[in-house]
């Protein structure tokens, strides 16, 4: 009997030792994995529960150095047809073309502060954590839960933030811009082999996520620069939103203080 109890004790200890994750080592691996990635493309889908139905926003993206392109298609209850939108952003400008409205929204980025540029860049490319993101993980390490999980036959690192409200503006660095107003907890699923994200979930008071992001494909192949050329009709209406963007980002900064 004593031998059986000893075997169970050893097995129990082994399970929990294997389940522990060295956070500093993991974040260092993430930093090394993403540090040299200058070109990345892929697809993800944003899902939001609205009035008992799910609004889906498929996104196709390309990122090459400081340039980013996102093709989005918004569909939901009551919408006669999906709204297609294409956006290109770099250090000098942001251009968004809304096909259904035949409207171009332009923002002059050259006059923005470096802090605002960095924040906007992180918000658009949250799927590729940079050195700043990893450093922010380290700063709030004691408020994160990091576990090893198996889901659908694959092994993941599950990073849980249980109180988003205490994270300040941190959540905007990995896809949670504005989520503090609606959600309390977030889960980030990282594939153990690739360290790429496969799912992000945002929860309110219940056990069902109110918003989740499924990462369908992430590639690190070379991207042709022609991807960032937009074919905008000559009769499209143009709206300059530079001042409005400055004002909005200023309010975000004030709210984060």
Image (tube, rainbow, N blue to C red):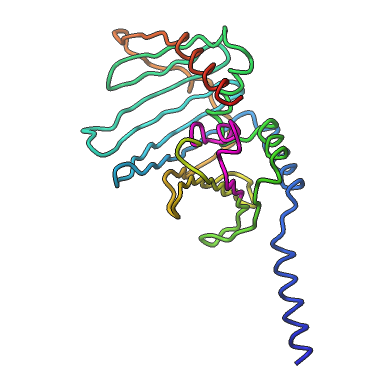
Q: In which quarter of the image is residue 30?
A: top right
Q: In which quarter of the image is the C terminus?
A: top right
- Whether 98 is drawn above or below 246: the answer is below
Closer-to-camera residue (83/134)? 134
What is the x, y in percent for residue 250?
Answer: 54, 16
Residue 104, image quadrant? top left
State the image coordinates of residue 163 (x, y, percent, origin top left).
57, 44
Q: In this view, does 195 lie above or below 222?
A: below
In the picture, measured across the screen, residue 191 lies left or right of residue 73, that is right
Is residue 164 shown in magenta? yes
Query: Does the magenta-highlighted stretch encompass residue 175?
Result: yes
Who is closer to the viewer here, 93 or 42? 93
Residue visible at 49% across and 46% down in the picture: 201
Q: Is residue 165 left or right of residue 75?
A: right
Position in image of residue 235 (x %, y %): 29, 8
Q: In which quarter of the image is the N terminus?
A: bottom right
Residue furthest to the bottom in view is 1
The mark total stands at 0
- Vertical arrangement, residue 11 with respect to residue 21, above or below: below
> Magenta region: which residues?
159-179
For residue 60, side relative to residue 232 (left or right): right
Give the residue displayed 57% in from the left and 7% down from the top: 111
Residue placed at 41% from the left, 18% from the top? 96
Give the image quarter of residue 253. top right
Give how far across and how far down residue 161 sits, in percent: 59, 46
Q: In this view, does 152 lie above or below 227?
A: below
């Amino acid at each position: 009997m004593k031998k059986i109890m000893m075997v169970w004790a050893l097995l129990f200890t082994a399970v929990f030792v294997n389940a522990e994750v060295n956070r500093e080592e993991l974040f260092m691996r993430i930093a090394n994995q993403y540090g040299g990635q200058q070109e990345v493309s892929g697809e993800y889908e944003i899902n939001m529960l609205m009035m008992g139905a799910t609004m889906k926003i498929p996104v196709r993206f390309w990122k090459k150095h400081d340039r980013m392109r996102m093709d989005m298609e918004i569909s939901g209850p009551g919408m006669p047809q999906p709204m297609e939108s294409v956006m290109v952003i770099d250090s000098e400008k942001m251009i968004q073309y809304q096909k259904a409205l035949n409207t171009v929204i332009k923002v002059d980025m050259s006059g923005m502060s470096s802090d605002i540029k960095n924040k906007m860049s992180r918000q658009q490319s949250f799927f590729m954590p940079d050195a700043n993101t990893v450093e922010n993980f380290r700063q709030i390490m004691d408020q994160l839960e990091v576990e090893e999980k198996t889901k659908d036959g694959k092994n993941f690192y599950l990073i849980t933030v249980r109180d988003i409200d205490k994270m300040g503006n941190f959540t905007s660095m990995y896809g949670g811009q504005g989520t503090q107003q609606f959600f309390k907890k977030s889960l980030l699923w990282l594939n153990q082999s690739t360290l790429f994200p496969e799912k992000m979930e945002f929860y309110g008071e219940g056990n069902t996520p109110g918003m989740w992001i499924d990462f369908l494909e992430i590639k690190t192949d070379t991207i042709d620069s022609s991807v960032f050329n937009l074919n905008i009709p000559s009769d499209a209406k143009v709206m300059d939103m530079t001042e409005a963007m400055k004002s909005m980002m200023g309010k975000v900064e004030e709210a984060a203080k």
